[in-house]
Image (cartoon, rainbow, N blue to C red):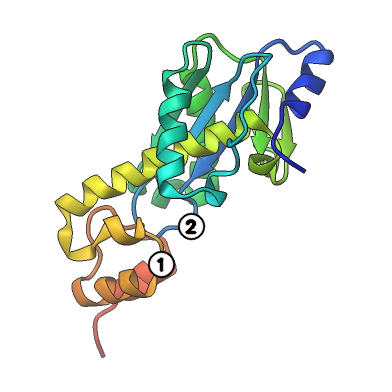
Amino acid sequence: MKCSLKHERALRRQGWRRVGGIDEAGRGPLAGPVVAAVVVLPVDFHHTELNDSKKLTEQKREQLYEEITSHGEIHWALAVVEPEEIDRLNILQATHEAMRRAVAALVPDPDHALIDGLPVLPFPMPQTALVGGDGLSFSIAAASIIAKVTRDRIMVEMCARYPAYEFARHKGYGTALHLAKLRAHGPCPIHRKSFAPVQQALLPLA
């Protein structure tokens, strides 16, 4: 099934006027923030290439990001939760908090949330959870692109700040390269100290 406005239209038929698609990027990495975005699309929106950000090339994500964020009739907002808060809350709760903050930042407010994955509780408005939503819903797919591109750009900036880890190459995910750098240098300030591979790097050598 292709991305469409099918789910947004179904919610509008139920009386919800402003449906915000929500997705996140950065739950899995060992370093850097988690980012969530919310997008409200025009009722007649259509796009032939918009899809789950994971299915797109980096170049295509950047192109679509510019299209979405510069479109005068598309309303969007995002929120960033930093590694220190991820360690304090745990990654699931930090992701949910990022989603709540993204919705709170959007003006005007949506009146219903269409969330990729499972329900987020508590949440400040009615919601519909849609597993695999970033490949089914245009608004969730747009949110996934905004969140992914934003987070990737942050990690490129962090690469300049902490060049020893080569964050621009792996974006903080637990690749072989990243794990090797982590073992060689230990964690830096943007590593998630509560994640097991980072904790292991903190242990003294036997």
Identify the residue at horizontal 46%, vertical 38% (top origin): 147
Q: Residues within 10 Å of mark 1 (few under 14, many from 20)?
A: some
**Alpha carbons under labels 2 and 1: distance apart:** 8 Å
**Residue at the extreme front of the image, as rendered:** 48
Going by the numbered disc 2, the residue's amino acid type is Gly
Instruction: Measuring from the top left, give residue 201's x and y in whole percent.
Output: 30, 74
Q: Position of residue 91 (x, y in %)?
A: 49, 51
Residue 35 in sight from this viewpoint: no
As rendered, which of 155 and 45 lies closer to the eye? 45
- Contact between labelled residues 1 and 2, with CB atoms less than 8 Å apart: yes
Tell me which corner region of the image, top left, top right, bottom left or bottom right, holds residue 100.
top right
Mark 2: give few (<14), some (14-19) or many (20+) Cα within 10 Å.
few
Q: Secondary structure at mark 1?
A: loop
The percent position of residue 24, horizontal first and vertical second, equals: 52, 41
Sequence-wise first label, 2 or 1? 2
Residue named by callout 2: 28
Residue at the image position 68 percent from the left and 14 percent from the top: 43
Task: Tell me which residue sits at (44%, 28%) in the image.
Answer: 78
Q: Is residue 65 above or below residue 19?
A: below
Q: Position of residue 191 (x, y in %)?
A: 31, 58
Residue wearing tag 1 = 174
Point 78% across, 27% down: residue: 6
Question: Does 187 appear above or below 152?
Answer: below
